[in-house]
């Protein structure tokens, strides 16, 4: 069989089958296509302005390394006029960060970008290893996620930068959409689909230029570009809902590669159907009413961590318990003996002309307002920010241990 | 947990001490019979379990009965008054159609509806409603042995008909969907020009049937080679046929047996198929617009002035509960014994993961979740139901700037008031078209370029506005 030719240039051998749509292309065309698609995302969402200083949240992993590489390429090719800076967080996980931070340091040299590393210990007085020592292996992703989201913003502030880009890819976003469907959290679902979280009025804006890029294509891009990245999963366990959603995504992708994009499309459309949520998937258009504090909380963490402050331990079990308690409290269990009068009973019990179930009686999706944490002064929708709450718990434990 | 013959759940609990399983703990509800079943973490007796399920169903049926009565002056009666021989419905003569898949959930609904009618009649009242039962079957669509397969299906349905003599049973075969005016056959570009059908339909009945089946087979053969596309279309066509039957027999509502679990599965599988926008229409009960693509009217898309009321009376029961219910309920033998043996929910060995449909993946997934976290399953359907129905696809309002309209309106207002002429429905799934979403997506993704690479982009433009994103994905990959 003669080798198939690239569907784009029709000259080179097609040695790549794109995971996204199974198109057969050559290596050169794949790299260009990938870059051009990210470019398209950047332009259509108006992510940057000329002269903007942008911090790339860099973990040393494939996503952020590809993001740094592509942004550098596009910045030069299309004269974005961006000043790009690498921003890394050191969670203090031995055997995980030590090596990946070395990778980031090499990237800084390779891409000729300044690098800032912020450590959990200097920000919070705790490394992740110490956190795990105290609270165990379960539920620590909550801590890591909450700390990291603030850390990126705080790091950006130190550098006087107002825009952080992260390496979240299409798989991550799809995962978050399914996860929030499973959790029944429509508010978060709506916000998680935005390419930009936070708007001009907030301190630090977040965006995900790789939002439409398939994880597999990112790996492929990194491979063919021979990028220097560090590949390891976080050694601590992923949160249950997210883990569950991730497994589903992988299965769906096998069956129908477009499923990941289709989930994104669904998620964006559904975001418009959530009562009281911002209309557009792009933070620059609709003035978001959920600014940076929630934005920072809602983003999934880099590398797929970040359980958004769910209960520690087995989140699914915890939620199941919670829901059952709610059911019991609301008295949803109707006295069946009364109901054996069939339709009659239901008819007389409900009032109103059209008993279609609507959102009239249901609780509205909670909307959060931005304030500042009274402990650390950091923006927060609560009186005390999540990080400070978690720290309080940790510090109590530490005090006891020392006694 | 099996008891041979005991009274239906509506009779006195004192009579039901026939349960044979030796258990020391009493039922937490009646505190007299031994608890033999686990119901959402509680040990209950068979009778209390049946009552529990029955109450969940009756609650919804009560809402429906009231809904039909109260809407007798609105859209639905308009529809019926335009039909010949049909006056406005009397509250006492409600007619419903039950879509019977022959799976445990719809069979449970059948039993529960019968129970409800028997109970009312037993008390000297009128039957609260008349019921038609339709099973849509894809049996014998392919290959030989067509007659035998269909005979089997018809035998099962006949058996059920004997069990429930009050109700009318019918079997409709899948190929009957071909030529239905609720599908935009021409616009779909599936090699199924409607003109061809009209001439062929004038032939003898036998010939027409063969032709329709052949056409449908052809259509399936032309789909992108994924089980998901096929399953997706099967589901849509079944729905079209049920709606057509409901309208033909002048029913006030179409009842579907979807359990909580099924609705959760639907939420996730429709999301995964790019149909998120239509979820509020699919998950909730209420009136759905029904399009008409009659070959005679030149206008490509015209929404029928009325619609169809669709209800899911078992939305509060889990699938596993309904499976149990069918094994426990029914006289003289449990209903489960009357159903065909194939059961999607059993985790049969997977030959190849690629051969699964997205629906099947979700069924497997939720079978797992349902086991340990039933409230999470229930929560999925409940919260998805809170999404608003948006008419984002109106012809005039699709320029992008207006984007999101009627954001603060509840869905109920929309249903009654929205100008149906403006609303454009998908030529395949009948869900509202989301032109704003389509345009934005195209802008964000440069979708055209991407499609050019995959399928060559031929003939895309023509059908773009006629079918929704999800249907396009299913038909064209």
Image (tube, coloured by chain):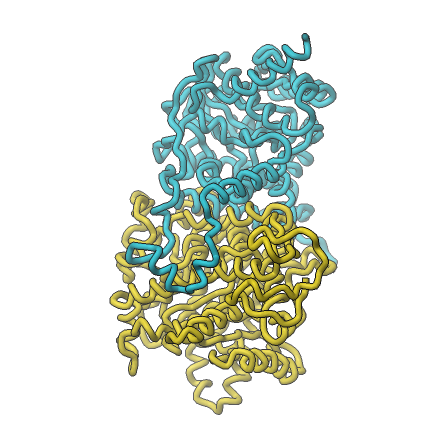
Colour of chain B in the rendered structure image:
yellow
Quadrant holding the C terminus of chain A: top right
At 36% from the left edge and 35% from the top edge, which residue is drawn? A285
In the rendered image, is residue B395 in sight? yes
Q: Position of residue A87 (x, y in %)?
A: 57, 19
At 65% from the left edge and 19% from the top edge, which residue is drawn? A131
Colour of chain A in the rendered structure image:
cyan
Quadrant in the rendering for residue B404: top left
Image: B466 above or below A148: below
At 37% from the left edge and 51% from the top edge, which residue is drawn? A358
In the rendered image, is residue B181 in sight? no
Image: B257 above or below A47: below
Quadrant holding the N terminus of chain A: bottom right
Q: Position of residue A252 (x, y in %)?
A: 62, 50
Residue projecting furthest to the top: A403
Q: Position of residue A36 (x, y in %)?
A: 52, 38
């Amino acid at each position: 069989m003669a080798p198939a030719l690239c569907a784009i240039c029709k000259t080179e051998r097609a040695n790549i089958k794109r995971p996204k749509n199974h198109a057969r292309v050559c290596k050169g065309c794949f790299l260009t296509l990938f870059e051009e698609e990210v470019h398209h995302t950047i332009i259509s969402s108006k992510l940057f302005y000329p002269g903007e200083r942008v911090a790339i949240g860099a973990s040393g992993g494939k996503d952020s390394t590809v993001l740094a590489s592509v942004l550098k390429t596009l910045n030069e090719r299309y004269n974005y006029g961006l000043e790009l800076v690498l921003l890394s967080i050191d969670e203090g996980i031995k055997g995980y960060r030590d090596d990946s931070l070395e990778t980031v340091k090499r990237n800084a040299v390779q891409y000729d970008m300044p690098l800032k590393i912020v450590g959990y210990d200097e920000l919070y007085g705790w490394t992740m290893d110490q956190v795990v020592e105290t609270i165990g292996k379960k539920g620590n992703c909550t801590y890591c996620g909450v700390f990291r989201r603030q850390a990126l913003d705080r790091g950006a502030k130190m550098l006087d930068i107002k825009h952080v880009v992260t390496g979240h890819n299409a798989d991550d976003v799809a995962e978050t959409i399914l996860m929030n469907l499973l959790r029944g959290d429509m508010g978060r679902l709506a916000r998680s689909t935005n390419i930009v979280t936070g708007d001009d009025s907030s301190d630090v804006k977040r965006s995900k230029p790789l939002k439409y890029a398939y994880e597999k294509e990112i790996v492929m891009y990194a491979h063919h570009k021979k990028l220097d990245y560090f590949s390891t999963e976080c050694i601590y366990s992923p949160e249950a809902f997210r883990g569950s959603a991730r497994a589903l995504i992988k299965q769906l992708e096998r069956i129908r590669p477009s499923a990941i994009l289709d989930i994104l499309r669904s998620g964006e459309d559904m975001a418009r159907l959530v009562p009281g949520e911002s209309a557009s998937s792009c933070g620059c258009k609709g003035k978001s009413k959920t600014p940076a504090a929630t934005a920072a909380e809602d983003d999934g963490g880099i590398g797929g961590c970040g359980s958004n402050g769910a209960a520690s331990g087995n989140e699914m079990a915890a939620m199941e318990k919670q829901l059952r308690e709610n059911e019991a409290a609301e008295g949803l269990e109707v006295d069946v003996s009364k109901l054996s009068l069939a339709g009659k009973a239901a008819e007389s019990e409900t009032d109103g002309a059209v008993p279609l179930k609507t959102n009239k009686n249901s609780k509205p999706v909670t909307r959060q307002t931005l304030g500042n944490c009274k402990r650390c002064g950091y923006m927060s929708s609560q009186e005390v920010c999540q990080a400070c709450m978690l720290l309080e718990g940790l510090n109590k434990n530490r005090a006891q241990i020392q006694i | 947990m099996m008891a041979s013959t005991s009274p239906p759940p509506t009779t006195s609990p004192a009579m039901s001490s026939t349960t044979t399983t030796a258990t020391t703990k009493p039922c937490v509800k009646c505190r007299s019979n031994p608890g033999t079943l686990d119901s959402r973490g509680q040990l209950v007796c068979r009778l209390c379990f049946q009552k529990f399920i029955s109450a969940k169903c009756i609650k919804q049926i009560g809402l429906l009965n009231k809904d039909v009565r109260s809407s007798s002056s609105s859209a639905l009666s308009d529809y019926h008054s335009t039909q010949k021989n049909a006056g406005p419905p009397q509250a006492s003569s409600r007619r419903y159609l039950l879509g019977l898949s022959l799976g445990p959930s719809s069979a449970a609904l059948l039993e529960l509806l019968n129970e409800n009618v028997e109970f009312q009649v037993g008390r000297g009242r009128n039957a609260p409603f008349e019921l038609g039962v339709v099973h849509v079957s894809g049996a014998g669509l392919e290959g030989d042995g067509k007659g035998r397969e269909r005979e089997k299906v018809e035998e099962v349905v006949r058996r059920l008909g004997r069990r429930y003599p009050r109700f009318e049973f019918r079997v409709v075969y899948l190929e009957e969907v071909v030529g239905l005016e609720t599908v935009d056959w021409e616009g779909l570009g599936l090699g199924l020009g409607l003109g061809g059908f009209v001439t062929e339909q004038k032939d003898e009945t036998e010939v027409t049937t063969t032709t329709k089946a052949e056409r449908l087979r052809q259509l399936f053969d032309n789909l992108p080679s994924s089980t998901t596309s096929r399953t997706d279309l099967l589901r849509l066509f079944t729905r079209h046929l049920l709606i057509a039957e409901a309208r033909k027999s002048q029913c006030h509502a179409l009842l579907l047996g979807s359990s909580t679990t099924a609705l959760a599965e639907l939420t996730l599988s429709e999301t995964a198929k790019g149909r998120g926008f239509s979820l509020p229409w699919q998950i909730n009960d209420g009136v759905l617009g029904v399009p008409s693509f009659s070959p005679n009217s030149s206008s490509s898309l015209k929404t029928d002035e009325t619609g169809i009321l669709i209800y899911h009376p078992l939305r509060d029961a889990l699938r596993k509960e309904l499976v149990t219910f069918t094994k426990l309920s029914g006289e003289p033998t449990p209903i489960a014994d009357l159903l065909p043996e194939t059961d999607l929910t059993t985790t049969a060995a997977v030959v190849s993961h690629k051969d699964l449909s997205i629906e099947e993946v979700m069924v497997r997934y939720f079978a797992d979740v349902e086991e340990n976290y039933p409230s999470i399953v229930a929560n999925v359907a409940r919260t998805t139901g809170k999404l608003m129905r948006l008419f984002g696809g109106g012809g005039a309002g699709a320029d992008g700037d207006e984007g999101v309209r009627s954001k603060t309106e509840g869905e109920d207002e929309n249903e009654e008031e929205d100008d149906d002429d403006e609303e454009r429905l998908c030529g395949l799934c009948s869900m509202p078209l989301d032109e704003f979403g389509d345009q934005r997506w195209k802008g964000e993704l440069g979708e055209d370029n991407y499609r050019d690479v995959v399928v060559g982009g031929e003939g895309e433009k023509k059908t773009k506005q006629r079918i929704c994103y999800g249907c396009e994905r299913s038909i064209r990959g």
